[in-house]
Amino acid sequence: MPAETVTVELGRRSYPVRIGAGVRREALAAAKARVDAGRRCAAITSPGVAGALPDFVAELGRLMPVLVTARDGETAKSAEEAARCWDFLAGNGVARDGAVLAFGGGVVGDLAGFAAASYQRGVEFIQVPTTLLAMVDSSVGGKTGINLASGKNLVGAFHQPAAVFADTELLRTLPGREFAAGMAEVIKHGLIADADLFGLLEQNAPLAWNHALLPAVVRRCVEIKAGVVAGDERETSAHGGRALLNLGHTFGHAVEAVAGYGTYLHGEAVAIGLAMAASLSSELGRCTPAQTERVRAVLTAHGLPDRLRGPLPVDRLLEAMRRDKKVRGGRMRFVLLEGVGAASTDDGVTEEAAVRALLAGGAAR
Ligand code: NAD
Ligand code: GLY
């Protein structure tokens, strides 16, 4: 299938997301054009990505200096690593007209994007995502950031990339567990906006990296995300809007934090959160118990957990949820399923109902 383009429509800041096998070469061409124009650029990647995809990193290295983060995983999204990025950019003479290229998963994209957003008050940024999660979600939409000891993504900036190159061939080396984690965000996109996509995921489970439908699935997710971002870039809508992309995330972020970062992959925690959000939605009569069962079934069919692997204390999960960035005026904001393919935000969900969803997902009193 030839590569395709989805445009994120943001006026003068609109940008293309190129999707398909081989588009990494377009990323190299885009980088070379900048370097040839005399602009100092730098790339940021991680040890795992550099080890799995050394040829592309070597090609990048012939064009520009490449920083390999000290480690992989959530702990790389730290103030310490951001400072290493800033020093690397400064040490290599990157100026206001320079650019930062992120080559990696959501961790590298969020970190490098934040470095690009903040260095010299903002330099250009290009994303070359290497995980399914980054291709369908984190590389698009301009949310960048790092974690604090007190919570995930608590420091960050909106900084849209100039272009995204999602080369599905790069998924060849992605470990199966990481691929499955990305499927959680794919399933989320179907649940919030596209019942047909959800049905396709039910009928073709488990979808592998080289399945003929994968590029089209990535494209559909990017289309959905691009549409949501274009309508509510900074997540300020009073109802719905960009917050819908957080279906399952209030629960999921709490699971990640309470279990300890790294116990569950981000996508696995989101999967558990999707199942909890579905059971909350059916308890509130917004979707049916049968639809909740479909959510659980599609998660497990794609190799994802639909409940906690071991019990976590419900009071600690609730405490983490109260710190969620979606809290407005002291009230937790939940994203609820309105059947399959539609969702809404709700500020009126009681803590008792949230507790019942946590318990249904394997939390313990
Ligand atoms: P990740 O970036 O940690 O990558 C997962 C692992 O796979 C890493 O060990 C990495 O080295 C390895 N890897 C990456 N690509 C590979 C490849 N092609 N071959 C072999 N190994 C490869 O994890 P992720 O799931 O991509 O991203 C999770 C992060 O994304 C979280 O921090 C989450 O908060 C963030 N996120 C951000 C947004 C956003 O809008 N900015 C959206 C969703 C998630
Ligand atoms: N992943 C949530 C967002 O981009 O808004």
Image: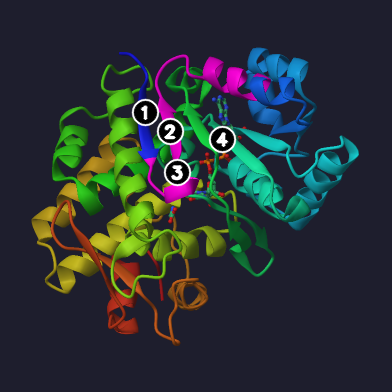
Query: Would you identify the image quadrant in which residue 278 lies?
Result: bottom left
Front position among marks 3 and 2: 3
Query: Would you identify the image quadrant in which residue 25 lies?
Result: top right
Report if residue 248 is visible in the image: no
Q: Are the two marked residues, 2 and 1, in contact with CB atoms closer than 8 angstroms?
A: yes
Asked if residue 2 lies left or right of residue 111, the reply is left
| Image quarter (top left, top right, bottom left or bottom right) of the N terminus | top left
Q: Residues within 10 Å of mark 3 (few under 14, many from 20)?
A: some
| Image quarter (top left, top right, bottom left or bottom right) of the C terminus | bottom left
User: Is ligand 1 less than 8 Å from the beta carbon at label 2?
Assistant: no
- Residue positioned most to the bottom: 329
Amino acid type, residue under disc 3 in the picture: Ser
Q: Position of residue 154 (x, y in %)?
A: 61, 66
Q: Position of residue 294 (x, y in %)?
A: 16, 48
* Identity of the residue drawn at 37% across and 64% down: 243
Q: Which callout, 4 or 2, points at the residue further toward the start of the chain?
A: 2
* SS for callout 4: strand
- Residue behind mark 4: 127
User: Is ligand 2 less than 8 Å from the beta carbon at label 1?
Assistant: no
Front position among marks 4 and 1: 1
Q: Which callout, 4 or 1, points at the residue further toward the start of the chain?
A: 1
The dot on residue 14 is 3
Q: Which residue occupies the foreground of this view, 37 or 156? A: 37
- Looking at the picture, does residue 88 appear above or below residue 58? below
Amino acid type, residue under disc 2 in the picture: Val
Amino acid type, residue under disc 1 in the picture: Thr
Span colored in magenta = 8-32
- Residue behind mark 2: 17
- Residue behind mark 1: 5
Tell me how far mark 3 sits from mark 4, CA to CA: 14 Å
Report if residue 339 is visible in the image: yes
